[in-house]
Image (cartoon, rainbow, N blue to C red):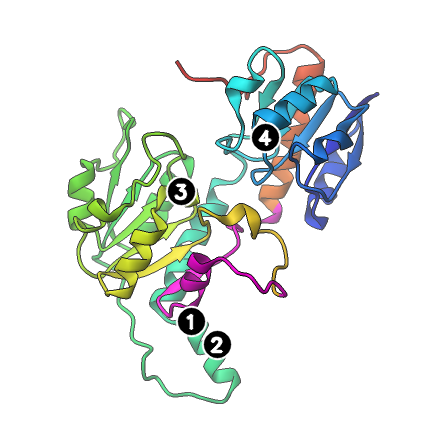
């Protein structure tokens, strides 16, 4: 029986992995994976890793020296993996889709909460304050939402927004052919959208896509939703535009410096991240801890597909979810 080292374990991970695992001796560790903790994989032939682990060249080299043959990512994103270092050494597999609806539903839920001040109403009424001052939002019907990235999550959000009778436009570097999606160029999307939601992967082409230059192309008062990757947004530019009122609000489930904070209780931390502190203190920002994926259905599919990826590898079958260097 192959031994697998499971890094970055949370209590909610084990339920479905224990259910689907029939063929492996899995050792669960709470430690995040990096070049120092990689030694925990000694004696294993494979590892299971998460999106906020550090799979840089140094970590890959340690894993390779330990005899690791396969890295099974229990996530879709792989921008945290040095694929060049892993090439011809260790196979890297991911879960490209596990529950697109979970993220799309969360994205619109965040926006509804911020727009209609639901979070503020909850806090106020618990203090027996039933005033409606400062609680005005706006109707979604007839508003234009620009969706950047039309993969499975983007498509799910398009369907949801059409249910609200919104005007939906989209931009993608690789538009889908024979689709009824209303594609526009990026500048048109930026210029005309009342709300912009990001659903694209983090690549060299998309890093800091939301920057000072592109923000100034947007409509004043625009709302931005990001449930994808933190580095799609240039944080300094976002904070500046939020402070001067150019951006009406932001719903952020990701943050470019999140790896040192998210998924952990940092409430006792004295030295805090200045940018993160600025964002969480703003009344027109909702920031959550990369939890848009976190539904029971998603966790079930993540475990099922991660185990299937390992089965395919050890059974020497076609690796449908292998992550390779493009080009």
Element type at mark 3: helix
Asked if the residue under mark 2 is in contact with the one under mark 1, i.e. CB atoms within 8 Å, the reply is yes
Task: Locate residue 223 relative to residue 157 in the image: left or right.
Answer: left
Answer few, some or many: residues within 10 Å of disc 4's Cα (few below 14, many 20 plus, some between 14 and 19): many
Residue of label 1: 118
Q: How crowded is mark 3: few (under 14 residues within 10 Å), some or many (20 or more)?
A: many
Q: Which of marks 2 and 4 is nearer the N terminus?
A: 4
Measure the C-alpha gap from mark 2 to mark 4: 40 Å
x, y percent for residue 75 = 56, 35
Q: Which residue is drawn at 73% across and 44% down?
A: 30
Pick whichever of labels 3 and 2 is earlier in the sequence.
2
Q: Magenta includes 2?
A: no
State the image coordinates of residue 239 (x, y, percent, origin top left).
33, 58
Which residue lies at the image location 29% right of the left edge and 52% below the top edge?
A: 237
- Mark 4–mark 3 Cα distance, whole angstroms, equals 17 Å
Image position of 8 (left or right of 112): right
Q: In terms of secondary structure, where does tag 2 sit?
A: helix
Q: How far apart are the alpha carbons under marks 1 and 2?
A: 6 Å
> Along the horizontal axis of the image, is 78 left or right of 307?
left
Do labels 3 and 2 touch, CB within 8 Å?
A: no
Q: Tell me how far mark 3 sits from mark 2, CA to CA.
A: 31 Å
Helix, strand or loop status at disc 4: loop
Q: Position of residue 322 (x, y in %)?
A: 55, 19
Considering only vertical position in the picture, is 68 above or below 229? Answer: above
Q: Which mark is residue 55?
A: 4
Pick the front one: 106 or 158: 106
Mark 2 lies on residue: 122
Depth order, front residue of 320/280 = 280
């Amino acid at each position: 029986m192959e031994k697998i080292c499971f890094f970055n374990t949370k209590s909610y991970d084990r339920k479905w992995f224990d259910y689907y695992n029939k063929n492996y001796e899995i050792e669960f560790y709470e430690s995040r994976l990096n070049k120092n903790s990689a030694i925990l994989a000694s004696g294993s032939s494979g590892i299971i890793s998460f999106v906020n682990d550090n799979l840089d060249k140094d970590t890959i080299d340690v894993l390779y020296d330990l005899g690791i043959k396969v890295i099974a990512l229990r996530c879709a994103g792989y921008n945290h993996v040095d694929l060049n270092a892993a090439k011809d050494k260790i196979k890297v597999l991911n879960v490209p889709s596990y529950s697109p609806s979970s993220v799309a539903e969360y994205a619109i839920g965040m926006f509804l909460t911020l727009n209609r001040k639901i979070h503020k109403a909850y806090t106020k009424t618990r203090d027996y304050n039933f005033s409606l001052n400062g609680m005005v939002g706006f109707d979604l019907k007839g508003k234009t939402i620009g969706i950047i990235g039309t993969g499975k999550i983007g498509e799910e959000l398009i369907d949801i927004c059409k249910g609200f009778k919104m005007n939906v436009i989209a931009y993608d570097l690789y538009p889908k052919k024979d689709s009824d999606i209303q594609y526009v160029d990026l500048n048109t999307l930026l210029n005309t959208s009342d709300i912009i939601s990001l659903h694209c992967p983090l690549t060299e082409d998309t890093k800091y896509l939301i920057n000072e230059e592109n923000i100034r192309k947007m409509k004043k008062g625009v709302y931005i939703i990001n449930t994808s990757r933190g580095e799609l947004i240039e944080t300094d530019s976002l904070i500046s535009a939020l402070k001067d009122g150019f951006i009406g609000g932001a719903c952020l489930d990701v943050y470019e410096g999140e790896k040192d904070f998210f998924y952990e209780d940092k409430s006792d931390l004295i030295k805090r991240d200045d940018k993160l502190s600025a964002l969480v203190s703003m009344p027109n920002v909702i920031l959550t801890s990369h939890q848009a994926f976190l539904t029971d259905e998603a966790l079930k599919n993540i475990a099922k597909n991660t185990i299937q990826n390992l089965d395919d590898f050890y059974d020497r079958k076609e690796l449908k979810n292998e992550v390779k260097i493009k080009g």
